[in-house]
Image (tube, rainbow, N blue to C red):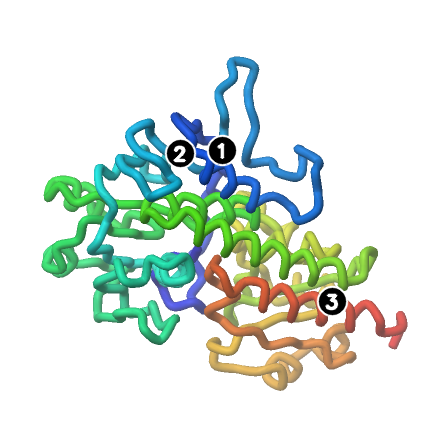
Amino acid sequence: MTDPRPPHTPRGPRPPRTPRARTLLAASAALGLLLAGCGSSGDDDPAAVPSAGTDEAGTTTDASTATDGGSAADGGFPVTVDTDGGELTLEERPERIVSLSPAATEILFAIGAGDQVVAADEFSTYPEQAPTTDLSGFEPNVEAVAAYEPDLVVVAYDPGDLVASLDALDIPVLVDAPPVDVESGYDDIAAYGLLTGHVDETADVVAQMRSEMEEAYAAAPQDADVRVYHEVDDTFFAASSNSFIGSVYAELGAENVADEADTDASGYPQLTEEAVVAADPELIVITDEIGYGPEDVAARPGWSEVTAVRNDAIVVVDADIASRWGPRLPQLVQTLADAVAEAAAVPAGR
């Protein structure tokens, strides 16, 4: 899930979020079905579901946490989840959610919790029925947020003292940073299902996402080894393998030219133009909201001999989908799988 800045704006270096191992305090049968739904279709190998398991003490671990106060089968509460901002407990199902994260807004509507969202930030432009306002997730106004009388506020990160200020008003806050890979993204969706009382709908969403993405991966060449450069903006910030979009390229068997520059594992390192040209990417991916297109990339001085430029392998993707973890991700995976396959099919030396 992205932070609330415009999708084309780089975050700059920051430590990656570590995938969280959370302890399930009490699980219902429906929650077990959710976890099963998050597993790979047709795969009975327990290793295929890294987010669930049982330790030697018999404690179940998973990406989502439910307290023993309620049943996930009927959206029972209280519910507790371990989040990037610490442990969060909701005593009752939230009915007035304010989302300051575009990715969170998409997820909430996808799992059936849209009617519980009373306000969303200025960049929450999808789906159409999202209650988009002028609220800012980048520079939030605590008084403006509190005016909606929320019983849950969702943010991608804590800008300044937002969380502390809302805590002082006794308003629960879910801090949910962008996932570092696809698997931890599924864990996050599971947490939203628990917190909003939509466990079954969430299981369906995750199962559908997995099915569509696995289909796209299966159709991609297994040994493509295509050098890819995913450009975030014209100052050469790029997505490395330490970002969720980078994990998609890795799954497609591509070689990410930004990895060498990502020395602090931020997920979005800034390269030099010389480094990009020297890496000679075979596929260049840009988004549709950066103010320039493939012809502008191709016209850069010194880029005419870059393989992707020579082979007309510069692909434009939807900026919102590429920068936000969410239920539309399979669309992006299919586009990238097709692009990698086409780049791999070009004869060497062309």
Residue at x-position 23% and y-position 64%: 119
Tell me which amino acid carries mark 2: Thr
- Identify the residue under disc 3: 340
- Identify the residue under disc 2: 65
Q: Secondary structure at mark 2?
A: loop
The numbered mark, 3 or 2, whose residue comes first in the sequence reads: 2
- Quadrant location of residue 218? bottom right
Residue at x-position 53% and y-position 51%: 267
- Quadrant location of residue 114? bottom left
For the residues labelled 1 and 2, say whether their Cβ atoms are less than 8 Å apart. Answer: yes
Task: Quote the CA–CA distance across marks 1 and 3.
Answer: 33 Å
Tell me which amino acid carries mark 3: Val
Of 59 and 159, nearer the camera is 59
- Identify the residue under disc 1: 62
Residue at x-position 50% and y-position 56%: 205
Quadrant occupied by the N terminus: bottom left
Tell me which amino acid carries mark 1: Asp
